Image (cartoon, grey):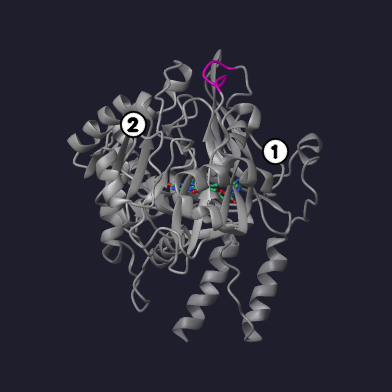
Amino acid sequence: MLRTSYQIFRCFNRRGLLWKQSPRYLTEDEKKDIPAVGKYRSPWKMFRKEIKDYFDENITPIEPEIPLETEALIIGGGAIGSSVAFWLKQRNPKGFRVTVIERDPGYTQASSMLAVGGIRHQFSVPENVQLSMFTSVFLRNIREYLSVLDSDPPDVQFNHQGYLFLVPEERAEYLSQSVEMQTNLGAKIRLMNRQMLAQKFPWLNLDGIALGSYGMEGEGWFDPWLLVRALKAKNISMGVQYVKGEVVDFDLKEVGLPGKKDLFLDSTVIKNPEGQLFKCRMSYVVNCAGPWAGQIARMAGIGVRKEEGLSTPLPVEPRKRFVYVVHCPDGPGLETPLTIDTTGVYFRREGLGGYYLCGASPNSEEEEPDTSNLDVDYDFYEKHVWPALAYRVPKFEVSKLKSAWAGFYDYNTFDQNLVIGPHPYHKNMVFANGLSGHGIQHAIPIGRALMELLIDGEYKTINLSRFEFPRLVDNEPIQEVAIV
Ligand SMILES: Cc1cc2nc3c(=O)[nH]c(=O)nc-3n(C[C@H](O)[C@H](O)[C@H](O)COP(=O)(O)OP(=O)(O)OC[C@H]3O[C@@H](n4cnc5c(N)ncnc54)[C@H](O)[C@@H]3O)c2cc1C
């Protein structure tokens, strides 16, 4: 009886809230890109149907619905969005409503699912080293962070085989300096001369290599899908609401005194799977849309409107990258690190059956592949990846290409680095974007950093303030050299 009353109360309560919500239809102009705009859902009819279903004992909760309001509205439920939700919710389980809007819960195109899953402490920017180092600690203790009562403890299959960067003579000094900085921060990286390389990795052809740097602890790779799955399960258990829907617009309100009016992001316009549009008011909207983060920023007028403070765009766009799966039963063994050749071609072991993943980024802007689809360019493998692979590891000469996939990097065209924190004008739009191929390994600490910023008002653990949006306005890039 108590349960029945509670459910009926919830029906009333939910519908009562819905009653106040009048879906905001876009103007004709705005609508033209939206295929089918659904009908207005009469709250009364929905309420009657729900009551009828209930008495027919047919009730299926229609949650998660698009809420009318939320404290944190996170756009994108990939690794970064799910991490932000995790840290916010675990810090304040009761007092903070956290909603994740994800248009594609199967994650068919999300970077997080298509990543290679590498984690390394070998970056040229100190904060990037610190971010990865925290991820290693988190992954080692993942059961403490992400276990859910009555479920199997999470396991992301962390392979601790390390990274191996190989450089020619002209880059040896840069590598030595980088390694010095990394070790000063506590990373366990070892510089290796040719003799040491030959001893430890006898399968390497050392022609053209002057120096290598090898990560002895905390580096390797893990399964990105298992990480997102574990984060999502934990989040749902804590009360984070994952809603299927697509953010299509923002509602901008004018605030301030006459003559000095500012625009304020009042609510987010979300299209549900039926094509209906709803508005959700939020205290903060966190842009975790990965490769599509630039589009989300444009919806808020960032880089589009002429107002002072809005003219600088968020320079994040999709850049297609291919991952090739090759079979080489006689290839390098179990202890093989994720190896990055002087040419930028990388490979790592995949499982235990003689399979390897490999790939490379294009050498120039002109060679960037078309991003209108996720088709794989097999010529790129033949012409660029395989020759470098077979030269560096002669055993790969007899490897066989088995399959391949493509995914989008969340590429920051400005400096290939993270953009974090609030927008200087739309202070309630917060970024966690532009990781340019290292976002899986940084998702966890970025979520923690945003939690600190939103709840404590400052970064408490790793100071990421120089990665905020003003560096784009002031044209002060923080170039990450070690982009793979
Ligand atoms: C081939 C490849 C290899 C990689 N290898 C590595 C690696 O080895 N190590 C590493 O650290 N990183 C790697 N990365 C990069 C890493 O995958 C990304 O940096 C990271 O996954 C970004 O996470 P995200 O959550 O921001 O983005 P995503 O995982 O792309 O999630 C964004 C989500 O936002 C959703 N979304 C977008 N727009 C909207 C909207 N309007 N409304 C609602 N939802 C929306 C999308 O559906 C998507 O699910 C690789 C990437 C690729 C493509």
Q: Position of residue 392 (x, y in %)?
A: 45, 44
Range drawn in magenta: 307-312
In this rendered view, identify the residue nearer to me: 438 or 307.
438
| Residue at image coords 35%, 61% | 158
Q: Secondary structure under badge 2?
A: loop
As rendered, which of 267 and 332 lies closer to the eye? 332
User: In the rendered image, which quarter is residue 352 located in?
Assistant: bottom left
The residue lying at 41 percent from left, 44 percent from top is: 205
Say if residue 77 shows up in the picture: no
Verify whether residue 309 appears in magenta: yes
Circle 1 residue? 370
Q: Is mark 1 within 8 Å of ligand 1?
A: no
- Provide the secondary structure element on which disc 1 rests: loop
Point out the tag, 1 or 2, that comes first from the N-terminus.
2
Q: Which numbered dot is residue 124?
A: 2
Residue 129 in view, yes or no: yes
The reply, left or right, for residue 57 in relation to residue 282 is right
Task: Pick out the residue farthest to the top.
Answer: 259
| Crowding at mark 1 (Cα within 10 Å: few <14, some 14-19, many 20+) | few
- Kind of residue indicated by mark 2: Ser
